Structure formats: C-alpha cells, structure tokens
Image: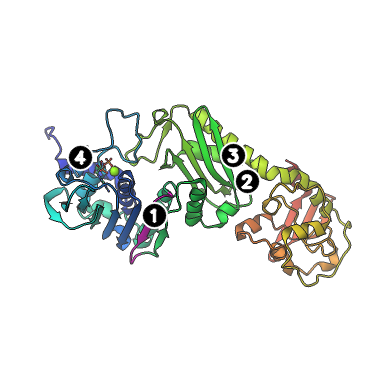
Amino acid sequence: MPIRQLSETMINQIAAGEVIERPASVVKELVENALDAGAGKVEIVTAGGGLSLIRVTDDGSGISEPELALAVARHCTSKLSDDIHDIRSLGFRGEALPSIGSVARLSIRSRTASGDSAAEIGIEGGRVLPVKPAAANRGTTVEVRDLFFATPARLKFMKGERAESSATGDVVKRIAIAFPAVRFTLAGADRSTLELPATGDTPDGRLARVAQVMGKDFPDNAIPIDAMRDGVHLAGHVSIPSYTRANALQQYAYVNGRPVRDKLIAGAIRGAFADVLPRDRHAVTVLFLSLDPATVDVNVHPAKADVRFRDPGLVRGLIFGAIREALAGAGIRAATSGAAGMMAAFRPGTAPYAHPGPTAGHRSYEAAYHASGFSGFDHGSNLARSPQRPLDMGDARQPRNGFAENEQAAFDTGPVASADARAGITEPAEALLGMALGAARAQVHENYIVAQTRDSLIIVDQHAAHERLVY
Ligand code: ADP
Ligand code: MG
C-alpha cells in the first residue's frame, strides 16, 4: 500500500484513542474546559453511564460565534501562547473537542458576555455541521451523545453503566477538590446526585470542599501540611496513622491545581508513612504542590495526568520531609509520653479488678483519661486521635480492656468494642479495627499477651509493641 496522509477524522480518532478512554475522560475534558473558561458553576448531567449522554453546562466566558468552528478543529486552542513551558491552564493541546467529535455526536452551544445571542455547532463522527443561531445564557453547554458510536471497538470495552457512572463521579470529585470556589453538580437517572456548593478559595474553604468530597471524618482525622523548599510549596492534609484505607485511591495530589496521578508523589507518601503503617494500609491524603510552571512538564501524556518535575529529588524530599515532620508533631509526641502509661496498663496485676458495671458513655475522653490515672501524656497533642493511645480509656476502677485485667472477666468481651464509645469517641470502624487490641487474657513467657476481642484472638508481642510505641 502506498504511503498516504490520514484523513482529519482518522487523525482525530487516533487522538481520541489516547485522550477519550471512557465517559469519565469526556467529563474530565469538558469540566477542565469550563474551569479554564473561568466558570463559577459547572453542571454535569449524564445518562446511561455517560455513554448515551454527557452534558456539561458552565457560566464561563463562552465562545464567540466566529470561533465555534475553530473550537472543534484540531490543534486549535486559546490557551497556549508561544511558550510550551508556561502552561497555566488545564487544557493546552487543542484536541479534546475534535477528538470527542470524531467518536460521538457533539454539540456546543455558547454565548459570550458581549455577544447578543448564542450560537451552536455540531460534529458527528467527525462530520462538522454548520453553525446556527441558538438561545442560551452566557456560558457554554457541551452535549455529547452516543459516545463511541463511530468506534464500536472502543464501545465494547466499556464496563457497564454503574462502573462508568462511578468513574465519572471520581473524576468530578478529584477535580472539585482543586476548585473550591466553583459550584459543581453531577446528576442523572444513572446516579445519585452529587452537589458541591462553592466553599471559597480560602484555607477554610479548601478544607470544607475536602470535607464535602471525602466526608467530614477526614478533616477530623487529618494533620495539616504546609511546607516550602526552594520555591516549591506543599500544602494540604494527611490522615493520622490510624485512619487508613485498603488502597491508595483516596490519595489526591495536585500540581498547580491540576489533578495528577504521579508515582513520585505516591512513593514519597508511602515512604513517609512506612514506619507508622502496615504495608497493606494506605494513608488518605490531599496534597497541593505549587511551583513555577517552567519547572514541571505536564505535556507527558495526552490525558495530562502525568507530570515530570525538573527536580524530582526536591519534590520527593519536600513531600517526604513535610509529612514525616507533621506526623512527628502530631502523633509521636503522644506516643512517646503515652507509652509509659500504656505499658503500666499492660503489666498484669497493677490495677484492681472490678466488676464490669454500667458504662459511662457520656463521659468525655479527657475525663476518662484523668480518671484512668495515667500520667505523662502531653495534653497539647491530640490524644483522642493518637493511634498509640492507651487501649482502655475507662477509669482505673473498671479496667475492662487494660491488660491489667483479672482473668475472672474472661468471658466478658462485650464492652471491648465499645471502649471508645464509652469514652465518647467516635471513629471510623477501620480505625477501631486497627487499634482495638481487645481484653487481655493471659501473658505467656513474659512477652506475649493473649487478648480476646468480640470475634477474634489476638497475640501481641509486647516488646515489639513497646518499641513501636516508643518509636
Ligand atoms: P484545549 O482545552 O486544549 O484548548 P479543547 O479542544 O478542549 O482544547 O478546546 C478548544 C478550545 O475551545 C479551547 O481552547 C477554548 O478556547 C474553547 N472552549 C472549549 N470549551 C469551552 C468552554 N466551556 N468555555 C469557553 N471556551 C471553551
Ligand atoms: Mg480542553
């Protein structure tokens, strides 16, 4: 076969193969465009997991009528001047809209602030339809129907409505964390509505947005990070070591406001937590890196989720160091001083036996702590959140879970799981699992403690536990 130039549509479909992997990638590109246009509100509607319909409406700057045809043409962008090293927008490649238009039915209806009416353009499987007048408020509505109708092979790889819907939800949440001043809604018959009212681009507003997306218990169980090194700024939050997940999906990272999935960042986080987390647990993190755009390359892959830092060592060191320092400040302080009290509670026979009586659920944690008679805790630290806090925060007369417990209580395991409830603490079940060591039943060879929880037997290597706490 002779060499020949590919058609525009084929070029766009090849590009779409990289950029538009699934409905969630369409949503990502369209939402990025809305944000680049300065939108204050972004409304997303999907149907059929996004395969039959994706509609993104924004109140941003809009596209003027004469520019509509350019917007859907390949390599046309309003975001890149002459310097590929100075990228300050989410988009810059000028290929999302033509790519989507080559594999689906796309329509764009838009109106600028100065335009007295709106206009609309369509593109179906690469065929551009004529621009026509339309009615719309200021801003842009992009509608994508029948995604991958023009590339049936890709369509076959879709995972089903639910999986696609949830991938889209994840994309919206991920990007929303970086834009707390923007209101996002995601709705459709194929999903439960996600509403994220604007919280404002202030430290409080940013944390409020994080709470909207990740749930309120994350901020309650997180330590702030704020560090600067050689012009690179790192801010955000990381979970305390007792608040973990079975995978790293809840590690959000942003480089100059762009959501990224970066191995270097993930590795630095893992390294920083290595000493305080079991290998199969993952911290929850939201980290924002800000640096001179010229020192980071975002043009690594068309999907723009990969980045390359000019000085990877600097970024890795900054993340690693800042998290370690924050963990030390928040957790280890409680741990070192708390260890003595805890070990006292471990030693058999140091506390008098008492019948398990009615619990004191209304008591505050602090009150429980004082009543316990422990000493040496650092009150400045957040004891209640410390993964290394004493096992039993009941008072000394009712050491139900302390290792000082008399074996006569051997079959009373009920209150164990509610130790925290008695102390007025509510924590995620996962966190409890990580620390409820249960009621001590015996000590073997002066080193192994055999404990019982509601449904399991736990053997604690006392020396290892001690070392870990002190560390
Ligand atoms: P890129 O975002 O890389 O520039 P796109 O293909 O995504 O490429 O978009 C092409 C151009 O269309 C953008 O540069 C922008 O000028 C315009 N555009 C796209 N979406 C919007 C929108 N929601 N509001 C305003 N302008 C838009
Ligand atoms: Mg774009």
Task: Name the residue tied to disc 2.
Answer: 277
Circle 4 sits on which residue? 74
* Disc 2 packing (10 Å; few <14; some 14–19; many ≥20): some
Q: Quadrant of the N terminus?
A: top left
Q: CA distance from mark 4 to mark 3?
A: 43 Å
What is the distance, in whole Å, between disc 2 and disc 1 at their CAs?
35 Å
Quadrant housing residue 137? bottom left
Type of residue at label 3?
A: Ile
Q: Which residues are magenta?
A: 180-190
Quadrant, the C terminus: top right
Residue of label 3: 323
Left or right: 456 in relation to 195? right
Residue on which disc 1 sits: 183
Q: CA distance from mark 4 to mark 2?
A: 48 Å
**Neighbours of disc 3 within 10 Å: few (<14), some (14-19), many (20+):** many
Question: For the residues marked 3 and 1, what is the alpha-carbon distance in whole angstroms?
Answer: 30 Å
**Earlier residue among tags 2 and 3:** 2
Q: Name the kind of residue labelled 1 in the image.
A: Arg
**For the residue marked with disc 2, what is the amino acid?**
Leu
Q: Residue at x 40, y 58 (%)?
A: 166
